[in-house]
Amino acid sequence: MAIRINRVYTRTGDRGETGLVGGERVGKDDPRIDCYGTVDELNSTIGLCRLHSAQFADFDAILARVQNELFNLGSLLATRAEDLRPTQPVIKQHHIDRLEHEIDQYNEGLGELRSFVLPGGGALGAHLHLARTVCRRAERLTVALGRHETVQDEAVMYLNRLSDALFVWARWAAHATGTPEALWQPEKT
């Protein structure tokens, strides 16, 4: 896939429109743009997580891979089904399967939950929780888009699984850094 970016600004979006992969022009407030824009926000949030994950090389490599997968997902969401190219990177079942394996792997040594976890658990944990909430929003927007346009099933499945992974990784990060998790106490108000 040959990509060349010579100029950052094009002025083609100055009137509130942008181009989808395939060339169609749509409003910048189009639900499809909202979807892949939120996936981009999620990718940036995972970039913040990586500020704190360097000490865990294997885990940092997972986050780096997820960032690339999210870029592929953004490309997929920026493309109408009829404009998908055979060589275009997409999300497939094996990406979802890998996340499930990693969820199981990182959940293995964690204690059983008897309450909801409040976002926190140190810098890495807190950023992973933030990424989880952005991921859930991306999932909701993608589901909503799928009610009106064709959206690849794996797009929603991937976001659903990734949000689960981010939750488990946030818990793991708290454990790995020796930071206690804050649990919800309904009577403590």
Image (cartoon, rainbow, N blue to C red):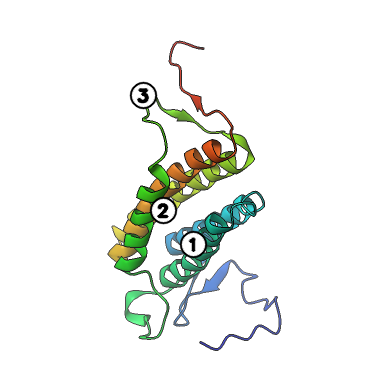
Spatial CA distance of label 1 from label 3 is: 29 Å
Whether residue 69 is visible to the viewer of this picture, yes or no, is yes
Which of the two marks, 3 or 2, is nearer to us in this view? 3
Residue 66 is labelled as: 1
Q: Name the N-terminal-most of marks 1 and 3.
A: 1
Reply above or below: 19 against 149.
Answer: below
- For the residue pair 65 and 69, the one nearer the viewer reads as 65
Reply above or below: 54 against 92.
Answer: above
Q: Look at the numbered discs 1 and 3 and tell me whether their residues touch, using CB distance below 8 Å.
A: no
Please state which amino acid type lies under the numbered disc 3.
Arg
Spatial CA distance of label 3 from label 2 is: 22 Å
Please state which amino acid type lies under the numbered disc 2.
Leu
User: Where residue 101 appears, x then y in whole percent?
Assistant: 35, 56
Q: Secondary structure at mark 3?
A: loop
Which of the two marks, 1 or 3, is nearer to us in this view? 3
Which residue in the protein does label 2 denote?
Answer: 162
Q: Is disc 2 surrounded by few (<14), some (14 to 19) or many (20+) residues within 10 Å?
A: many
**Residue at the spot 51% in from the left edge and 56% down from the top edge:** 38
Please state which amino acid type lies under the numbered disc 1.
Val
- For the residue pair 24 and 63, the one nearer the viewer reads as 63
Which residue in the protein does label 3 denote?
Answer: 114
**Residue at the spot 63% in from the left edge and 86% down from the top edge:** 4
Q: Name the N-terminal-most of marks 2 and 1.
A: 1
Residue 128 is labelled as: none
User: Where residue 42 appears, x then y in whole percent?
Assistant: 53, 55
Left or right of 41 on screen, residue 113 = left
The total number of labels drawn is 3
Q: Is disc 3 surrounded by few (<14), some (14 to 19) or many (20+) residues within 10 Å?
A: few
**Residue at the spot 42% in from the left edge and 68% down from the top edge:** 77
Q: Name the N-terminal-most of marks 3 and 2.
A: 3
Q: Look at the numbered discs 2 and 1 and tell me whether their residues touch, using CB distance below 8 Å.
A: yes
